[in-house]
Image (tube, rainbow, N blue to C red):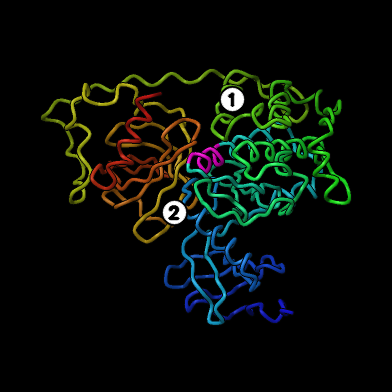
């Protein structure tokens, strides 16, 4: 029998020759998560090390790395690299987040105010939309795997931490045998028990269970033994919301939660993107409420600012030089040849993206407008440690649509940087990734 305590790495020791262990964040029979520091890159990371030698768990761990590494989304944890310890245990390094899990919040507060639940569910819809569009189903979404932190001006910025039992839909291998229960049955979709393969709608059901628990203070179904909980998902009707919830939360939002909890997967939102589209329309058309139930009217969307008059050629300020083989000058492209739907002057935020500089430092980027040649927005969390000076090379993960259901990564150069936090204009490089560039152009043209 493996002594897991003996296999823990001590604080101050080094893993992989470069990660100094600073703290044990979580531990279990299968693995341990450490807070670690990579000195050569001046980066604090979370390091997950597999303890078990079980071949099935090792394969799941590798699949978790594969699934998470394929995803690039602000609400999904980022993996930096994977490797092996001197005693041949697999590990991977991921971004370190300073916050609390949703489970911690529920244990401290019991229930969560409607407007916070709406915020969290909207972010989960966007993240799952990105995963589902790449053929990845999480299959085990629960409050323990959701980190809530103050980030990017959002007090409840939500990040999915774990894709440990995710299924890559085109994969031929299936590690979970029928009847085997992995994860927490309080969040299992009814079809988990009867179907060999579950699809994106199973993740939507889990989000519904999480939203219900946040609003009510307990999951819709919970019993002992665990198998009884699973059968309750299959056979029992969802308990109605209590009066204290229906008296404060808008009926339209509660209806969406119940929609996610339909027994038949075909009756739910088909995937994260479909859920996000419904939530997005709800946010625009419906008054918000405070925790006391008082309505707060949401103002109509701001009209885009009128385009500025083009300066006379003699007075024009030269644009910063683009990197070799890269970005084009926006003003060199006739307006008639640009995407007609692009809104570079709009001050209404589109969605969050991510910036990455040459040193590997990242920050959140609030996108405010785009053309085929440039994007504009505000650099938010983490921008103080980045090189965001004019002319600095940068990579950006930018949303293709307003739901944030798909992101593309592009290279570019900082063309403008003003204020604190900085307002940026980044000239994009079509040559860097033509396919991603065209996806961005097509996505904006469709809006």
Mark 1: few, some, or many residues within 10 Å (few <14, many ≥20)? Answer: some
Q: Is residue 321 above or below residue 116?
A: below
Q: In x, y percent, where is residue 225?
A: 88, 51
Q: Position of residue 92 (x, y in %)?
A: 53, 66
Residue 257 in magenta stretch: no
Q: Quadrant of the image for the C terminus?
A: top left
- Name the residue that disc number 1 marks: 278
Residue where numbered disc 2 is placed: 362
Q: Identify the residue at image location x=52%, y=53%.
A: 67
Mark 2 burial class by Cα count in 10 Å: few <14, some 14-19, many 20+: many
Q: CA distance from mark 2 to mark 1?
A: 31 Å
Magenta segment main secondary structure: helix
Observer-nearest residue: 398 or 136?
A: 136
The label shown at residue 134 is: none
Relative placement, left or right, of 50 versus 108 is left
> Please, what secondary structure does the residue beneath circle 1 have?
helix
Answer left or right for 258 relative to 349.
Answer: right
Residue drawn at x 53%, y 82% as measured from the top left:
86
**Over which residues does the magenta segment extend?**
126-133
């Amino acid at each position: 029998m493996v002594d897991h305590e003996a296999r823990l790495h001590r604080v101050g020791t080094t893993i992989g020759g470069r990660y100094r262990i600073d703290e044990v964040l979580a531990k279990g029979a299968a693995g341990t998560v450490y807070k670690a520091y990579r000195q050569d890159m001046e980066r604090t990371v979370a390091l997950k090390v597999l303890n078990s030698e079980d071949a099935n768990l090792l394969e799941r761990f590798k699949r978790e790395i594969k699934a998470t590494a394929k995803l690039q989304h602000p609400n999904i944890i980022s993996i930096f690299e994977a490797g092996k310890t001197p005693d041949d245990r697999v590990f991977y390094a991921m971004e370190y987040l300073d916050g609390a899990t949703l489970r911690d919040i529920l244990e401290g507060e019991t229930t969560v105010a409607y407007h916070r639940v709406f915020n969290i569910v909207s972010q989960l819809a966007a993240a799952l939309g990105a995963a589902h569009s790449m053929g990845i189903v999480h299959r085990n979404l629960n409050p323990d795997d959701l980190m809530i932190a103050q980030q990017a001006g959002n007090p409840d910025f939500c990040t999915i931490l774990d894709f440990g039992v995710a299924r890559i839909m085109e994969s031929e291998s299936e590690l979970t045998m029928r009847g085997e229960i992995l994860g927490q049955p309080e969040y299992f979709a009814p079809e988990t028990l009867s179907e060999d393969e579950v699809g994106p709608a199973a993740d939507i059901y889990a989000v519904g269970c999480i939203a219900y628990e946040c609003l009510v203070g307990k999951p819709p179904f919970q019993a002992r033994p665990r198998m009884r909980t699973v059968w309750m998902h299959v056979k029992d009707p969802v308990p109605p919301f209590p009066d204290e919830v229906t008296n404060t939360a808008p009926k339209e939002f509660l209806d969406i939660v119940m929609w996610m909890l339909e027994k038949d997967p075909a009756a739910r939102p088909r995937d994260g993107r479909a859920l996000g589209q419904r939530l997005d329309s709800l946010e625009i058309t419906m008054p918000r409420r405070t925790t006391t139930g008082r309505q707060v009217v949401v103002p109509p969307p701001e009209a885009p600012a009128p385009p500025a008059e083009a300066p006379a050629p003699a007075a024009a300020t030269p644009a910063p030089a683009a990197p070799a083989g890269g970005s084009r000058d926006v003003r060199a492209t006739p307006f008639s040849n640009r995407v007609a739907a692009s809104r570079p002057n709009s001050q209404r935020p589109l969605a969050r993206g991510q910036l990455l500089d040459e040193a590997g430092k990242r920050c959140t980027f609030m996108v405010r407008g785009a053309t085929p040649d440039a994007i504009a927005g505000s650099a938010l969390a983490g921008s103080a440690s980045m090189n965001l000076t004019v002319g600095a090379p940068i990579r950006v993960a930018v949303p293709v649509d307003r739901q944030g259901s798909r992101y593309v990564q592009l290279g570019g150069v900082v063309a403008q940087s003003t204020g604190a936090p900085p307002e940026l204009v980044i000239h994009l490089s079509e040559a860097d990734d033509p396919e991603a560039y065209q996806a961005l152009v097509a996505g904006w043209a469709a809006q």
